[in-house]
Image (cartoon, grey):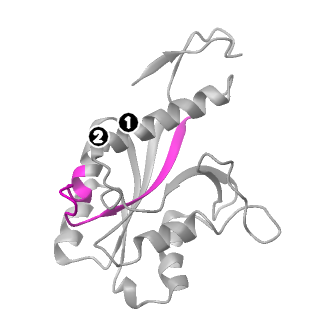
Amino acid sequence: MRRYRRQGSGCLGCREVAMAQVRLWTVLGEGGVGKSTTVGHLIGHFGKGTNGLRPGRGDGMREILLRGGGYINVVGRRQSLQEAGISPQVAARTIRAQAAREERVRPGIRSAYFNVLLALRTDRTKRLPPAEDYLSYFLHLGSQLESIAVLSPARRDELLYRRFGVSICYVYDSSELDISQMVGQVRNHFGWA
């Protein structure tokens, strides 16, 4: 676990604080199945505002209403990492830097988790590996995989992603579904309102 020194943390007796654990929710699928649309709706349609939306703070952090009540802060990345040309190593470094920055911004408060919602492709594109390689790398670094949603899964996907041992949702024929149905299935699976 990565540690850093915090000056004046306000935590009685605290000299060194561990960085929050990265916790991942993922939307997986090949190109054109609705990953970006799903993530966009999940990080855009929630909150305490009068219209159901709560604007972000400018750092990508969003407040998401949970189905059982309460909120969690989540950083969402709409475009799949592979389509953006981001390797697993660069993605992990970026996420960890965001988590560390979040800890520095709120001195005196130790977060248990830094929550991230990602879109990943299940196939190879731009010479980058498929989703399982990204997830395996993140887990190797100590991240926690919270949940997986696979859009329009192939038989290979059904067998492969269950091996990660987390709750998994398969949304079949996602590109033929109404957007609200597709997003609703994923939102319900994640436990988000």
Question: Can see residue 20?
Answer: no
Q: On screen, 69 above or below 18?
A: below
Residue beneath label 2, please? 89
Tell me, yes or no, whether the highlighted magenta stretch contains residue 127: yes
Tell me, yes or no, whether the highlighted magenta stretch contains residue 92: no
Residue depicted at x 22% and y 51%: 133
Percent position of residue 140, x then y: 27, 38
**Which quadrant of the figure contains the C terminus?**
bottom right
Mark 2: amino acid:
Gln
Find out whether the residues at labels 1 and 2 contact each other: C-beta distance under 8 Å.
Answer: yes
Residue depicted at x 41% and y 76%: 34
Residue in the foreground of this view, choosing between 42 and 167: 42
Mark 1: amino acid:
Arg
Q: Is 180 left or right of 34, judged from the image as shown?
A: right
Q: Is 16 left or right of 171, judged from the image as shown?
A: right
Percent position of residue 155, x then y: 18, 77
Q: On screen, 161 above or below 138?
A: below
Please report the bounds of the magenta region as a residue range: 112-133
Residue in the foreground of this view, choosing between 123 and 191: 123
Residue depicted at x 16% and y 71%: 156
Percent position of residue 90, x then y: 33, 41
Residue beneath label 1, please? 93
Percent position of residue 5, x then y: 53, 13
**Which quadrant of the figure contains the N terminus?**
top left
Residue depicted at x 32% and y 50%: 86
The mark found on residue 189 in the picture is none
